[in-house]
């Protein structure tokens, strides 16, 4: 309850009750604890059925002052893998997804310092399992660029431009905070992302990044991307396209995109269909992935997903087959 | 963009038999406050937390009614363009960024009391509930039950 108000004059709804998907504000502090978890069951090709605890992610944020907020996200990845006659936690890893300080000067100007999600497209910025409709992630939303950056970012909303233009401009000089060994992190990078609600139901975005990665020193890459999301009445169409050009020539370029449609099937069931194409560096033609799925959205915090995907020209061992998962936001 | 066509459309689609067409709703701030809402767009940006500060730098404390309250549903449909539950995905995404939705109070009287005691607050109540504790900074019309109900 807000301070400075006479006790008993009003009652914040559910002020005392914790609800899934709304975080937990530690009593008598400005600390909020939240997060999400995700477990899956899969069958890929000739591999055995596999059950995994994919992620357990904790957010902790502290509104230190009226303008200063500290935010962290720590994720336990691949904590447990269970296959017939074999259980393992060998692949588990504690990842630092985000750790930053935000200074809010005004609505149009915020400064972020630390480790943050790279603002390319939309999926990477909302990638938490309970927020997306499929268990698998389109390749174009993570493969052509490091998904995290350590550096500085200016961001905000220009509310005087139409319905409000969201922007973010960022730079990194490498030195990634707790670099994930699975990610070829930024060495030097700068970029920007713009997002605009063209209609109440339509959001469009534009991304640009120029970067060099730690494992490819001397190779400068430019990435250009567009994204769009239309949502109305339970229906949703999402698409992202990206092209990455390299100073090393066409053989190091990557490109791809996806289009995904979601439709209500009745009750809490939703149908999902997606087509994606991704051409990895040096691989031609690229892989095409077709996906069909049915989701059961229990409420805004809990979702059950099932999907079957089929890959064509799969030279990069892209994940396909049957995949089901349960994801909860807490 | 005018919000009146949206209100009329909402009336045609959802009006129950006892509804009053054009029930005025007042957006209010504390009495004596200099804070103002200039347009439906600005109001929408406040309730989506795209606008989080008043021009004097104070952080806006926007107040909602419960999601099932008829006035909240009308407000959401007319001002935000969607029903409260259709904003679940939006608020999940904001939550992932560490941004929580507006606070919820149980009744128009609770909204009035909270706003009267909170300098940076803004909320909405039926116009007939407005009294000296608050000042009206914006009005719009929705279908809702009458004040006496």
Image: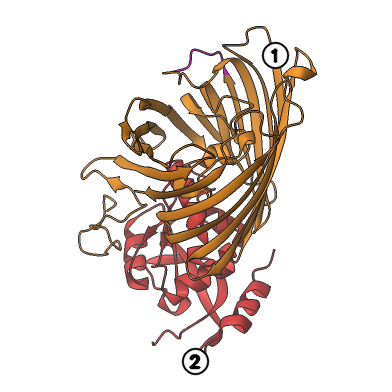
Query: In the rendering, at what x and y percent does residue B28 appear?
Result: 46, 64
Tag 2 residue: B18
Q: Is residue A209 above or below residue A87?
A: above
Q: Which residues are magenta?
A: A172-176
Badge 2, how many Cα within 10 Å: few under 14, some, many 20+?
Answer: few
Q: Which chain appears orange?
A: A
Mark 2 or mark 1, whichever is nearer to me: 1
Q: Which mark is residue A327?
A: none
Query: In the rendering, at what x and y percent does residue B106 appear?
Result: 33, 69
Residue drawn at 26 percent across, 51 percent down = A4
Q: Is residue B74 visible?
A: yes
Identify which residue, A156 or A131, lies in the foreground. Answer: A131
Answer whether residue A175 is magenta in the image: yes
Rendering quarter of residue A146: top right
Tag 1 residue: A220
Question: The residue tagged with tag 2: helix, strand or loop?
Answer: loop
The answer to whether residue B63 is left or right of residue A277 is: left
Residue drawn at 24 percent across, 58 percent down = A17
Answer whether residue B1 is magenta in the image: no
Q: Is residue A314 above or below residue B41?
A: above
Rendering quarter of residue A109: top right
């Amino acid at each position: 309850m807000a301070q400075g108000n006479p006790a008993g004059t009003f009652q914040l709804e559910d002020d005392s009750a914790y609800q899934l998907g709304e975080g937990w504000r530690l009593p008598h502090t400005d600390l909020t604890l939240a997060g999400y978890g995700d477990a899956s069951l899969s069958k890929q090709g000739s591999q055995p059925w596999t059950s995994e605890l994919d992620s357990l992610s904790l957010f902790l944020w502290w509104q230190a002052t009226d303008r200063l907020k500290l935010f962290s996200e720590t994720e336990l990845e691949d904590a447990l893998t269970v296959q017939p006659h074999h259980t393992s936690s060998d692949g588990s890893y504690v990842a630092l997804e985000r750790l930053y300080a935000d200074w809010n000067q005004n609505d149009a100007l915020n400064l972020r310092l630390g480790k943050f999600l790279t603002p390319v497209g939309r999926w990477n910025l909302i990638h938490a399992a309970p927020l997306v409709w499929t268990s698998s992630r389109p390749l174009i939303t993570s493969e052509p660029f490091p998904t995290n950056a350590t550096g500085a970012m200016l961001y905000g909303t220009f509310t005087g431009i139409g319905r409000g233009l969201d922007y973010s401009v960022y730079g990194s000089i490498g030195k990634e905070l707790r670099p994930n060994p699975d990610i070829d992190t930024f060495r030097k990078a700068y970029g920007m992302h713009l997002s605009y609600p063209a209609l109440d139901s339509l959001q469009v975005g534009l991304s640009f990044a120029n970067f060099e990665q730690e494992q490819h020193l001397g190779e400068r890459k430019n990435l250009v991307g567009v994204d769009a999301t239309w949502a109305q009445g339970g229906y949703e169409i999402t698409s992202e396209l990206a092209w990455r050009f390299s100073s090393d020539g066409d053989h190091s370029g990557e490109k791809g995109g996806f289009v995904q449609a979601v439709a209500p099937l009745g009750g809490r069931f939703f149908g999902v269909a997606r087509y994606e194409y991704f051409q990895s560096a040096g691989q031609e033609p690229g892989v095409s992935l077709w996906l069909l799925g049915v989701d059961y959205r229990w409420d805004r915090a809990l979702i059950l997903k099932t999907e079957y995907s089929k890959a064509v020209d799969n030279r990069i061992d892209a994940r396909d087959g049957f995949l089901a998962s349960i994801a909860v936001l807490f | 963009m005018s919000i009146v066509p949206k209100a009329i459309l909402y009336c045609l689609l959802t009006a129950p038999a006892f509804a009053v067409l054009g029930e005025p709703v007042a957006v209010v701030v504390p009495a004596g406050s200099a804070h103002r809402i200039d347009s439906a767009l600005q109001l929408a940006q406040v309730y989506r937390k795209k606008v989080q500060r008043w021009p004097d730098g104070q952080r806006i404390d926007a107040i909602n009614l419960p999601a099932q309250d008829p006035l909240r549903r009308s407000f959401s449909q007319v001002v935000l363009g969607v029903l409260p539950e259709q904003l679940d995905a939006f608020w999940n995404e904001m939550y992932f960024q560490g941004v929580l939705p507006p606070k919820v109070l149980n009744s128009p009287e609770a909204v009035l009391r909270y706003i009267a005691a909170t300098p940076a607050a803004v909320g909405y109540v039926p116009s007939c509930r407005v009294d000296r504790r608050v000042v009206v900074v914006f009005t719009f019309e929705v279908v809702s039950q009458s004040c006496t109900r």
